[in-house]
């Protein structure tokens, strides 16, 4: 488990910004490729034994007394009681609420943080967490270990995560895992835009939009997630990968 001392601090030398600024000399590009590879391996090792997860996306900016925070907290409880680990970005707001609900229900609570110059701090309800330098590595981890995705109200980052997952499902890069939008009042305008503009223009199929489940009920969401995981994807509770001594696990 990574220590908390560096959580939320901007990476030295703005390395990831330089990485996205175009071509650099071959030596520095090779070194970055190695660093990215190491970051992937570190994430795989940290998260290999967390068990089947449900990832909860949402804003870091909602305080503990906000209704969406309370909704996410109940989502975490219900997901945990269904036998899944709850995975989030590990920070405050919706992420904290979902992790908190999982902890309160006696379940497993996991966080995948991205290093930022502000806003991100570890919440107090994590059993396991790991920190990443690159957004794309972090998004792989949040998708790789999940049987479903619950998308709470949020901003640019949440929308990015929602459409990343939707695109992966649409293109067959991952299986047709449930994608649940929690908060009908918040998400209904987006669904209307997708239907009235994108589907009408033929840029998105009606079937693509039908994959998004819209609800205000954590119980309804978790029932759909549990059914998909066990009936459609053959998840068997209690089956966990074995640790290997020669891999220092």
Image (cartoon, rainbow, N blue to C red):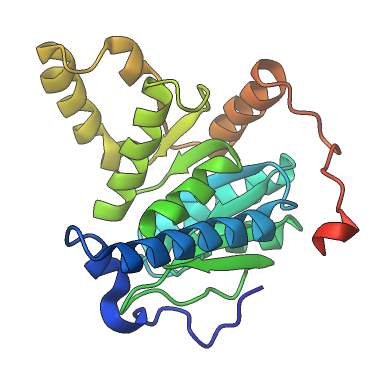
Relative to residue 174, is residue 198 drawn left or right?
Answer: left
Determine the residue positioned at 59% across, 75% down.
124
Determine the residue positioned at 30% across, 67% down.
16
Relative to residue 178, is residue 81 drawn left or right?
Answer: right
Determine the residue positioned at 74% across, 28% down.
235
Whether residue 249 can be seen here: no
> Which residue occupies the foreground of this view, 114 or 201?
114
Q: Position of residue 151 (x, y in %)?
A: 41, 43
Whether residue 202 can be seen here: yes
Q: Position of residue 11 (x, y in %)?
A: 36, 79
> Which residue occupies the foreground of this view, 33 or 103?
33
Q: Quadrant of the N terminus?
A: bottom right
Query: Based on the displayed image, in which of its 4 quarters is residue 194 positioned?
Result: top left
Q: Position of residue 87 (x, y in %)?
A: 57, 53
Outermost residue, front direction? 26
Determine the residue positioned at 51% across, 57% down.
37
Q: Position of residue 117 (x, y in %)?
A: 30, 79
């Amino acid at each position: 488990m990574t220590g908390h001392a560096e959580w939320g601090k901007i990476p030295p030398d703005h390395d990831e910004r330089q990485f996205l600024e175009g071509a650099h000399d071959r030596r520095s590009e090779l070194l970055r490729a190695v660093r990215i590879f190491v970051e992937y391996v570190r994430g795989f090792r940290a998260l290999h034994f967390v068990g089947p997860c449900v990832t909860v996306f949402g804003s870091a900016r909602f305080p503990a007394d906000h209704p969406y925070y309370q909704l996410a907290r109940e989502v975490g409880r219900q997901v945990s009681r269904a036998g899944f680990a709850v995975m989030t970005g590990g920070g405050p707001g919706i992420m904290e609420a979902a992790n908190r609900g999982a902890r309160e229900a006696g379940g497993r609570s996991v966080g995948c943080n991205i290093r930022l110059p502000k806003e991100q701090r570890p919440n107090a309800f994590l059993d396991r967490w790991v920190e990443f330098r690159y957004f794309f590595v972090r998004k792989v981890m949040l998708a790789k270990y999940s049987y479903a995705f619950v998308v709470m109200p949020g901003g640019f980052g949440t929308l990015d995560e929602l459409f990343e997952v939707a695109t992966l499902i649409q293109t067959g890069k991952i299986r047709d895992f449930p994608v649940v939008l929690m908060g009908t009042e918040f998400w209904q305008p987006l669904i209307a835009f997708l239907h009235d503009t994108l589907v009408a223009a033929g840029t998105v199929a009606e079937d693509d939009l039908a994959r998004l489940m819209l609800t205000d009920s954590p119980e309804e969401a978790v029932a759909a997630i549990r059914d998909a995981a066990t009936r459609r994807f053959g998840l068997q509770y209690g089956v966990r990968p074995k640790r290997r001594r020669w891999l220092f696990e």
